[in-house]
Every structure is written in structure tokens, then in C-alpha cells.
Image: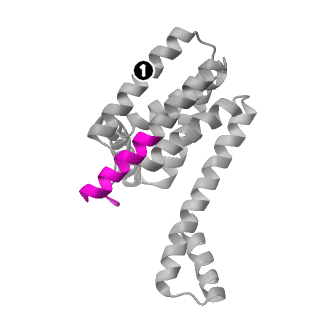
Amino acid sequence: MIKKLSKRLSILLSKSLDGSSEDVEIWAYGLELLLNGTIKFGLIAGLSASFGIFKPTILTLITFAVFRCFGGGVHFSTYLRCLTFGVIKFLILGSISNMKGNMSNYSLLFFVTLFLGILTIIKWVPGDTEIKPIKDKEDRKKQKIKTTIVLIFWMIIVQILISLNSFKYILPIILGALTSFIFITPLGYWFITSIDNILDKTKVKYEEVK
């Protein structure tokens, strides 16, 4: 439905701006991403606000998205699965982030995330997909450098929050980064692919029965 809507809007836009057929495809793709992202963010924001976990959930989402933008990672095969899993995932992370903990636990989780981040950047960034694989060595190197810069900024932000005793913001930022790195690793790819395969088999069996 969103794909069709994006296509129609891009055609209307093309007529107004006298665009080419190639422009239509580019605009349709961009609009689809925008609409998908807006719907997902709206659901996460609305549900997290109703559960009283808005701030930690949004902080986790923003941190995850920033690392995801540069580091890449695994995707579900359909938008509906991505939307459903994403909403559930961030609500769970927001709930966990809302819990009170002690500094020693935060420090341990920080160093675990930092270690995983460095390992992930060296071995698996960028985490590409079958649809958009990144094979060029220079492009891969650039993504590694960009993700490293983001990781450095993340480290600085966490340390500033610690110095300001803003502990309620530390856990969401750490969990957002940790989750993003996990879904760049082979374990993350295996997890999402396994769910995809189970859902595909369930769908086939349902259609056969129907």
C-alpha cells in the first residue's frame, strides 16, 4: 500500500515538475522510505508515550538509528515484519532503559558495547544486504571510518553524561548502540533470517490450508 501511494505521489510530483521516468522511480523510493520511517516513528512515539517510557525509548531509537545509518545491518524481507519487530524491540528497550541501575552495571555494559563496537567495525561494518551490497573496498573503508567517528562521539557523550550524573540517559544510549551493533554481526543476521524463514513457512502452510 505504501509503495503504491509513494508511486502515485511521485507521478503527481513528476507532472508538476516535468520530471522524467527515472525521476519518478527515485522520488518513489525516497517517498517510500520517508513514509515508512514516519509511520514507524509515529507508532513507537505514540505507544512509548502511552506506556510512560517516551524519553528512554526515543533516546534508544535515535542512538540505534545513527549507528544503523553508517554501520548498516540486517533487515527483514517485508516492511510489515520490520515495522512489527521494530516497534516491539524499541518498546522493550525503552522499558529496560527506564529501570534504575547502579554505576558498576552501567560501566560494565558500556565496556561490553565499546568492545563489540570496535570488533564489529573491524570485521563486519558495513552490514549490507542482498539488495544493496557494498563490495567496493574504498566504500567499505569509508563506512568503517564514519562508524568509528560516530563511536568516538558516542563515547564522549556517555562520559559527559556520567560527569553530569545524568544516569537516566546513559542506559538508553548504551542499549541503542549495543542493539545496533548486534544486528550487524553474523548472530544478528542469523536471528532475523531465522524469524523470516519461520514466518515464510508459516505463511505457506496457512495458504495451503486455506
Q: Position of residue 12 (x, y in %)?
A: 64, 82
**The quadrant where residue 178 appears:** top left
Residue 7, above or below 196 = below
Which sits in the foreground, 64 or 146?
Answer: 146
Q: Where is residue 102 in the image (x, y as percent from the top left)?
A: 58, 9
Q: Name the residue under label 1.
A: 111
Residue 123, above or below 104 = below
Sort mark 1 into few (<14), some (14-19) or many (20+) by Cα contacts within 10 Å. few
In the rendered image, the quadrant that contains the C terminus is bottom left
Q: Is the magenta stretch mostly helix, strand or loop?
A: helix
Q: Where is residue 142 in the image (x, y as percent from the top left)?
A: 35, 52
Image point (33%, 41%), residue name: 189
Q: Is residue 137 magenta?
A: yes
- Residue 179 located left or right of residue 163: left
Residue 134 visible in the shown view: no
Which sits in the foreground, 39 or 56?
Answer: 56
Image point (55%, 26%), residue name: 158
Image point (62%, 35%), residue name: 59
